[in-house]
Amino acid sequence: MQHNNRQNQFDRNRYYKLLRVGKQELGWDDEFYYGIWLPIQGATLKDGRYSASTLSNTQLFSAVEAMKSKGFKVKYRSGNKRTRRITPQRRLADDAQSRKIRALWLELHNAGKVRNPSEESLCAYVKRMTNVDALQWLSSTDASGVIEALKKWLKREAKPAASAATR
């Protein structure tokens, strides 16, 4: 019986893609990437220009790790494209409490306390808090509870930084 060792093999194409995405995310132009950065990583000339395809597997891995150290963050896909559930777009809740909840959520994101500022992540938070799927369906009492929880979150996270500055 043969086993598939595909997972144990080094996927060069994946690393080429990571290099391209990293170059774009870090805002590097072609002159810097091909003329300076790739040669530093060990690339050699191919068709008159430095190419990532001339890097060894170890050098490719090290190049991606170097990009990560410069601030590149690898984003992983969640699940198979074919099986990912597509949720229909709802209109945003437009009442005053929903706008306040959304504003507090974005303020938390700007303060670095929430990673994902999207409406989907806000709805997931609201569902954990109230067991209601969307802001449109929140009762006034539930919306007030969410607003107060978000305000407390803002205050709670701000206190340690303020106390550290006084020391």
Image (tube, grey):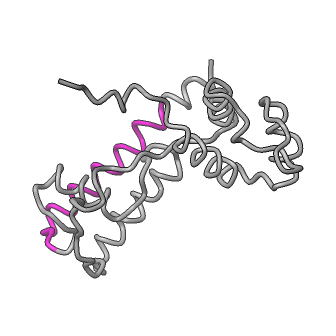
18 to 90, vertically: above or below: above
The answer to which of 114 and 31 lies nearer the viewer is 31
The part of the image, by quadrant, that contains residue 54 is: top right
Q: Is residue 147 magenta?
A: yes
The residue lying at 32 percent from left, 50 percent from top is: 78
Relative to 54, 120 lies left or right: left
Residue 53 percent location from the top left of the image: 69, 41
Which residue corresponds to the image point at 56% horizontal and 31% vertical from the top-left? 162
Residue 141 drawn above or below residue 72 = below
At a point 85% along the width and 41% down the height, the residue shown is 45
Q: Quadrant of the N terminus?
A: top left
Furthest-top residue in view? 167
Task: Determine the main secondary structure of the stretch shown in magenta.
Answer: helix
Q: How many marks?
A: 0
132 relative to 47 in the view: left or right: left
Q: Is residue 46 above or below residue 9?
A: below
Q: Nearer the viewer, residue 121 or 150?
A: 121
| Residue 148 percent across, percent down from the top left | 28, 52
State which region is magenta: 137-159
Residue 6 picture quarter: top left
Horizontal arrangement in the rendering, residue 73 relative to residue 6 (left or right)? right
Whether the magenta-drawn stretch holds residue 100 is answered as no
> Looking at the picture, how far across and down is residue 95, in whole percent?
28, 79
Q: What residue lies at 28% left-to-right and 48% top-to-bottom?
A: 149
Residue 12 % position (x, y): 55, 38
Q: Quadrant of the C terminus?
A: top right
Q: Is residue 100 above or below residue 17?
A: below
In this view of the protein, which residue sits in the foreground, 157 or 53?
53
Outermost residue toward the front in this view:
1
